[in-house]
Image: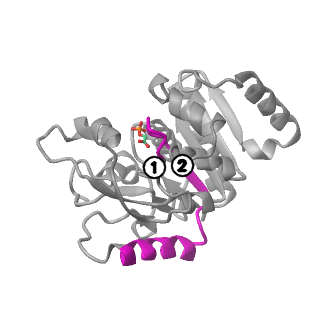
Amino acid sequence: MLVVIKKDYEEVSREAARIVAGAIRANPEVVLGLATGSTPLGLYKELIAFHRDGNLDFSGVTTFNLDEYLGLAPSHPQSFHHFMEYNFFSQVNVPRDQIHIPDGTITADYEGYCARYEQSIKAAGGIELQILGIGRNGHVGFNEPTSSLASRTRLKALSRETIEDNRHFFSDGTEMPKCAITMGIGTILDSRRVLLLASGRSKAAAVAKAIEGPITSSVSASALQMHPDVTFIIDEEAAYSLTQRDYYRHVLEMTQLFTPERLS
Ligand code: PGA
């Protein structure tokens, strides 16, 4: 596990963009796992800037998003379809048929739908690089505390904390969804490389539990300790509660010296 501590959100975003752009240049047909939320916005802005400058072509890239609210149509302003379209896809050239986001409008056969989402990830060759944020309760995707560490894509009831954290987005009077469709922790662990981004003091406790705490379904992100290639890119504020910061810096220096490809 690599822990990269950057000064602030801008540096976190730039470092993540450098790695994602590198993955696309190394394999123009790369399969990316994408996340929504405020955290990856800076990453998307950087990637869009690379694309505008003519330095990054997404025409071969395939994407799978982590999750979507149940009951929201793609046109709903709070849907993750809308978020991705507005903040990323409308400004880069990922072909439409290579974009996958769980469908929040399904009303029957949830298991069948989720099994097909899993199957489409497999058919694309699996996710090469998965981007994650982290919730204050340690969730990744919408894998709320006590999610099975072996879970696959499925319908998930949102926790009260998540509903409260996201309620302000629904201030237009729309009722906040109570469920979501989310990739499972098992799905995330199957991706070949994971980048988890976090910024701000409000994430410090969750980040410390994920990196230094025991592996527990009470903190879904702690399952990443079982993944062979995870990089946490976090700012000083999000790193606040880590006890081994000096060691992580040392690990990074040694990685730069001996296995720099892990950082490219
Ligand atoms: P945020 O959400 O990026 O908006 O903080 C992260 C998450 O809940 O996974």
Asked if ligand 1 lies within 8 A of label 1, the reply is yes
Mark 2 falls on what kind of element?
Answer: strand
- Mark 1 or mark 2: whose residue is earlier in sequence: 1
Answer whether residue 21 is visible to the viewer in this image: no
Q: Is residue 29 visible?
A: yes
Residue 224 falls within the magenta-colored stretch = no
What quarter of the picture does the N terminus occupy? top right
Q: Position of residue 186 (x, y in %)?
A: 56, 61
Q: Amino acid at mark 1?
A: Ala
- Secondary structure type for disc 1: loop
Is 225 left, or right, of 9 in this rendering? right
Indicate the quadrant where residue 233 lies: top right
Q: Is residue 127 magenta?
A: yes
Residue at the image position 34 percent from the left and 46 percent from the top:
159
Q: How is the image coloured?
A: one colour
Residue at the disc numbered 1: 35
Is residue 209 or residue 181 the one in the foreground? 209
Q: CA distance from mark 1 to mark 2?
A: 6 Å
Residue bearing the label numbered 2: 131
Q: Which residues are magenta?
A: 111-139
111 lies left or right of 10: left
Q: Nearer the viewer, residue 82 or 139?
A: 139
Are discs 1 and 2 less than 8 Å apart at CB? yes
* Residue 127 place in picture, x, y as percent: 58, 62
Q: Residue furthest right?
A: 258
